[in-house]
Structure formats: structure tokens, C-alpha cells
């Protein structure tokens, strides 16, 4: 076993010579830590374990965000490919939550190859294409430093429903609606305009006060609770959440469409809507933001970049290992 470890450690030096690069000492120690203690796979849950209290989760998120910031600027082909992959997964999950039946592989084919999947409806194809276009749009909004407002919201919703429901795309509903499988009854359409005015007032009053994760969570929950559109409320709400997170330097945060996660999502949201208790939903989203940061860091921290990026993150990992050894 020791010989195998020595061989793998030597591979770091071999990589440096082969690629003609110099890996910073802190990063080299970090890679050695992964090889010797983590069986070649980084698991950040060792450093940031599951917690029950929202305050602690937000502290972990803040530290993970600092870790991610230590790798900025995030650039290069590997970062672009990583973002493309996460965007595909997010598009797949967000549309699947709403009933789309394309698989992740089929979603990637539609987005990357422009193929039509046999046996799937035209509407399902447009849901995938539209969602990715809307996601690209919010990234452009962030890049251009545009403030979130009513026009931005309606533009995003228009992208979600274009070629699907032209008459409703980008417009508040003028009918009353019910949510299938939910106890929450959305307000009558006569209240929508006033409630949406309050929605944007809340944002303006709290955009510089609230923790950005909580702000994003609130704007997500409040929008889907008002349910201002005849269709596309969930997808739009999750995009608005990510717009706010991206504005504050977080990666795209996904909510998995797998059964357990989807059920937790619906249950936490229903509790917020029917019992006036948002604590579960706040924790649910905060944990998803944490998971997104962990997934991102676990990949970019072990790439072949020879620069001194990530010093804060690598130092933290090494400090954790040293403290564990002393116990």
C-alpha cells in the first residue's frame, strides 16, 4: 500500500515535468492530501458537514464562497465546459420538475446537437431550448450589471413560454388558476398587479440588507406563491433565484428533480405557503447553494492550473487535516 501511495505522489512531480509547469507548494500538499487520505477523491463534506441550523449553513456557504472567490477570475476552456455541463443539468432538472420527460442525455443532445428526439412532443423540445436561452439571458443581465426589475422578469418569462403559449408569454395572468397537487390556492388575478408591486418593493427595500442566499430564496418563494403567470411560474422563480445568486458571485444553483429532492422541495414550499413558516424552505435552498459550491470547488480545485489561485481554499483544507491529526 505504501509503495502505491509513493507511486501516486511521484505522479504529481511527473505531471509537473511533463507539462513543464510548477504547481504551488500549497496546492501540491493539497493534492498529496487527497491521494493519501481521501483515496484520490475530494469530499468537502468532511470540512463542511451537514448542519441543522440555518445560521451555521449560511456560515458554511460564506466560507465556501470565499474559497471559490480565491480561484477568481474563473476563466479558461475547462471553466466554460464545466459551466456548460452544470447549465445542462440545471435545465434538465428545472424542466423535469415541471413534467418534461426528456432524459439528461436527450436534453444535452437537443441543446448541443439540435436533434429532435423521437416520441417526444414539440412542446418538450421548446421547454428545453427556451429554458437554456433564458438561463443565458440572466447571465448576460449579470454581465451587463442590469438591475432586477419588472421588465427583466417579464422578459425571462417570455423566453420560457415563447413558441409554447404566445398569448401568455411575458404577461401577468388574467384568469384564476389552481396548482395541481398543492393545497396552496394562488390569489385571484385581480390581486396580481398589486402583489407584484409589493414583490418589487420588497426587493428594493431588502436587496442590500438581506443575506444574498436568503434574498434569492425569498424572491423565489414569493414569486411562485403569487403565481403571477398562467404557466412557467416554477421555472421563472428558480431563474430569478439564480439571477440574484449570480449577481452575488455564486454558481448556478440547481434543485434536483430526483424523487427525494423534488418531494422535499414541494413540501418545504407548501409549508411556506400554507403555514406561514419559511424556515424549512430557507434551509432547503441554503443547502442547495452549499451543494452547488461544493460541486464546483471539488472540480476546479484539482485541475492542472499552475497559478497561485485557490490559496485560501487549499490552506483551509490543510488546516483541517492538521487539526484532525492532532485530535
Image (cartoon, rainbow, N blue to C red):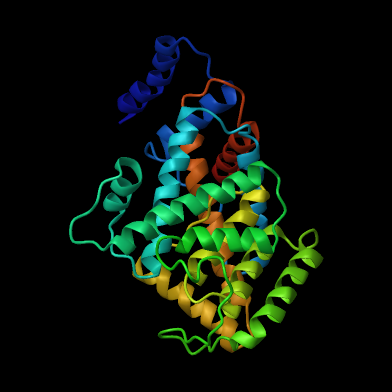
Give the residue displayed 39% in from the left and 60% down from the top: 127
Q: What quarter of the picture does the N terminus occupy?
A: top left
| Residue 118 or residue 33, whichever sits in front | 118
| Residue 165 or residue 287, whichever sits in front | 165
Tell me: 229 left or right of 103.
right
| Residue 203 or residue 188, whichever sits in front | 188
Position of residue 199 measured from the top left corner of the image (x, y, whole percent): 70, 73
Residue 251 at least partly seen: no
Against 277, residue 213 (above or below) is: above
Give the residue displayed 59% in from the left and 74% down from the top: 172
Tell me: 209 left or right of 73.
right
Against 165, residue 324 (above or below) is: above
As drawn, the residue found furthest toward the front would be: 167
Give the residue displayed 61% in from the left and 73% down from the top: 223
Give the residue displayed 57% in from the left and 70% down from the top: 171
The answer to which image quadrant residue 274 occupies is bottom right
| Residue 269 or residue 40, whichever sits in front | 269
Position of residue 192 measured from the top left corner of the image (x, y, whole percent): 64, 81
Residue 226 at least partly seen: yes
Position of residue 325 measured from the top left corner of the image (x, y, whole percent): 54, 42
Against 238, residue 113 (above or below) is: above
Position of residue 226 measured from the top left corner of the image (x, y, whole percent): 60, 79
**How many numbered marks, from 0 up?**
0
Amino acid at each position: 500500500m505504501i509503495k502505491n501511495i509513493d507511486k501516486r505522489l511521484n505522479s504529481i512531480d511527473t505531471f509537473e515535468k511533463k507539462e513543464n509547469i510548477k504547481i504551488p507548494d500549497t496546492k501540491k500538499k493539497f493534492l498529496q492530501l487527497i491521494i493519501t487520505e481521501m483515496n484520490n477523491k475530494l469530499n468537502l463534506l468532511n470540512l463542511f458537514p451537514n448542519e441543522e441550523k440555518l445560521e451555521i449553513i449560511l456560515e458554511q456557504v460564506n466560507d465556501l464562497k470565499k474559497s471559490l472567490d480565491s480561484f477568481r477570475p474563473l476563466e479558461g476552456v475547462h471553466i466554460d465546459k464545466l459551466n456548460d455541463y452544470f447549465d445542462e443539468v440545471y435545465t434538465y432538472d428545472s424542466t423535469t420538475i415541471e413534467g418534461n420527460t426528456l432524459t439528461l442525455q436527450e436534453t444535452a443532445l437537443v441543446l448541443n446537437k439540435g436533434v429532435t428526439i423521437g416520441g417526444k412532443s414539440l412542446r418538450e423540445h421548446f421547454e428545453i431550448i427556451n429554458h437554456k436561452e433564458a438561463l443565458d439571458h440572466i447571465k448576460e443581465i449579470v454581465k451587463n450589471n442590469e438591475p432586477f426589475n419588472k421588465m427583466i422578469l417579464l422578459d425571462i418569462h417570455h423566453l420560457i413560454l415563447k413558441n409554447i403559449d404566445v398569448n401568455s408569454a411575458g404577461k401577468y395572468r388574467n384568469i384564476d388558476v389552481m396548482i395541481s397537487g398543492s393545497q396552496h390556492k394562488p390569489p385571484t388575478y385581480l390581486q396580481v398587479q398589486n402583489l407584484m408591486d409589493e414583490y418589487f418593493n420588497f426587493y428594493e427595500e431588502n436587496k442590500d440588507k438581506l443575506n444574498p442566499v436568503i434574498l434569492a430564496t425569498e424572491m423565489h418563494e414569493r414569486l411562485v406563491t403569487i403565481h403571477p403567470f398562467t404557466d412557467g411560474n416554477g421555472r421563472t422563480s428558480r431563474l430569478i433565484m439564480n439571477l440574484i445568486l449570480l449577481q452575488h458571485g455564486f454558481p448556478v444553483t440547481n434543485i434536483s428533480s430526483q424523487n427525494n429532492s423534488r418531494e422535499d422541495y414541494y413540501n418545504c414550499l407548501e409549508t411556506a405557503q400554507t403555514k406561514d413558516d419559511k424556515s424549512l424552505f430557507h434551509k432547503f435552498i441554503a443547502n442547495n447553494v452549499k451543494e452547488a459550491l461544493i460541486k464546483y470547488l471539488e472540480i476546479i480545485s484539482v485541475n492542472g492550473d499552475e497559478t497561485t489561485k485557490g490559496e485560501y481554499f487549499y490552506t483551509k483544507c490543510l488546516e483541517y487535516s492538521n487539526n484532525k491529526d492532532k485530535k
